[in-house]
Image: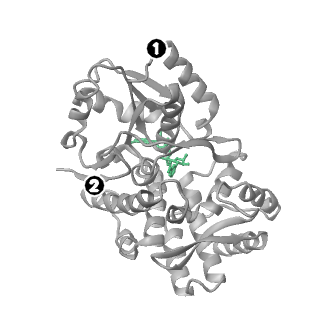
Amino acid sequence: MFQKIESNGYEIEVGSLENTSFSEFLDGYSQVKKLILVDENTHDHCLEYLLTAFNGLEDAEVMLMPCGEENKVLEVCFQVWEAWTDYKIGRKDLVINLGGGVVTDMGGFIASIYKRGIDFIHIPTSLLAMVDASVGGKTGIDLGMHKNQLGVFSNPKKVFVDAGFLTTLPNVEIKNGFAEMIKHGLILDRKHWENLKSIDFDDKASLTELIFESINIKNNLVKVDPFEKNERKKLNFGHTFGHAFEGFFMGEAVLLAHGHAVAIGIIAESYISFERKLLSEANFIEISTLICSHFEIPTFKNEWVDLIFNLMLNDKKNFDEKVQCVLLSDIGECIVDQPIYKKDLMLVMDLFANLNS
Ligand SMILES: NC(=O)c1ccc[n+]([C@@H]2O[C@H](COP(=O)([O-])OP(=O)(O)OC[C@H]3O[C@@H](n4cnc5c(N)ncnc54)[C@H](O)[C@@H]3O)[C@@H](O)[C@H]2O)c1
């Protein structure tokens, strides 16, 4: 048994891969070359299952990419495009992105640009990629400290979500995906938020149900607004501050993972919501307490404020030369296009210092 979600012209199938239509889907590509994109970890932990459990992948070319956000860059894309050109990959061939959000974002981008676009599917292997990165058609790569600065909207042919892959995913990465699930509950669905409070990361059956809930929340937004004109903007909650924090740490010795950055971005944007009297203090405390029980807040230095705010000023979501943000009006409700100023960032820095003391 598997559950099916209709998206914009493609389906997301949630369940054990062997029970989904993956085999039949591959049959449709029996006459063409198949390329499986993996990073070092999904090569070691996820690839063998795919190659041994399914017919039709015996001759697949496996392309290994270096893992980590620092490799979601144009230089790696060039290498893959050159290799595909050498392998004579054609317009009818199929790319299978097997990995976390870095592989699905970059693999989708590489496939969408190559020969003006070849078919690709996602098999997400991290929780974050299952509930977020593989859904909604955004593909892209980073440019220096600027997250996802280069990219295109491009839909996969299918997405197959199998929580079985999570058995080898380190706990810290599970929590990164949990941050995006929290976001989904907070912006749109109080029930999902409540369900997440008692999440058991080891209970795969209950996890599959929560993953399904979370994908549905995101998918309902991207279906009505695929190009982020209105409703889809809600998904940026936690990301105005989160992307700037993540980008800032790309220039430091220790990176801040995307999910971790979003988690503290959610605290920041919930706090601004409370400061502007949109969100009650009780709700703010409920949110920050849950997040702080899973994520550490890094130490921020006051002299970093200008650089972090500069990153916010370059955010793709801005208009009217103002930093734009999503704020909460309740748990399960939000409002978009709220301006953010440097003084808000300074308030957040004070909050973080207090939470850390
Ligand atoms: N396109 C979108 O809409 C969207 C949405 C949210 C996030 N993103 C992007 O997603 C990226 C973050 O994704 P992520 O957190 O999955 O990062 P990631 O792809 O770097 O994966 C995290 C780590 O887990 C490893 N890994 C993945 N699956 C594994 C498995 N089953 N077993 C063992 N190790 C495994 C990876 O090799 C990596 O080391 C960011 O670049 C972010 O910008 C995109």
Rendered image: mark on residue 53: none
What amino acid type is highlighted by mark number 2? Lys
Label 1 sits on what residue type? Tyr
Quarter of the image with the C terminus is: bottom right
Q: Residue 87 carries which label?
A: 1
Numbered disc 2: secondary structure:
helix
Which residue is label 2 attached to? 204
Q: For this view, does 268 lie left or right of residue 124?
A: right
Separation of marks 2 and 1 at Cα, in angstroms:
39 Å
Residue at horizontal 52 percent and vertical 74 percent from the top: 334
In the figure, is residue 184 to the left or right of 144?
left
The answer to whether 50 is drawn above or below residue 293 in the figure is above
In this rendering, the answer to whether 333 lies above or below 301 is below
Q: Nearer the viewer, residue 323 or 244?
A: 323
Q: Position of residue 80 (x, y in %)?
A: 53, 24
Residue neighbourhood size for the residue with mark 2, other residues' Cα within 10 Å, grouped as few (<14), some (14–19), many (≥20): some
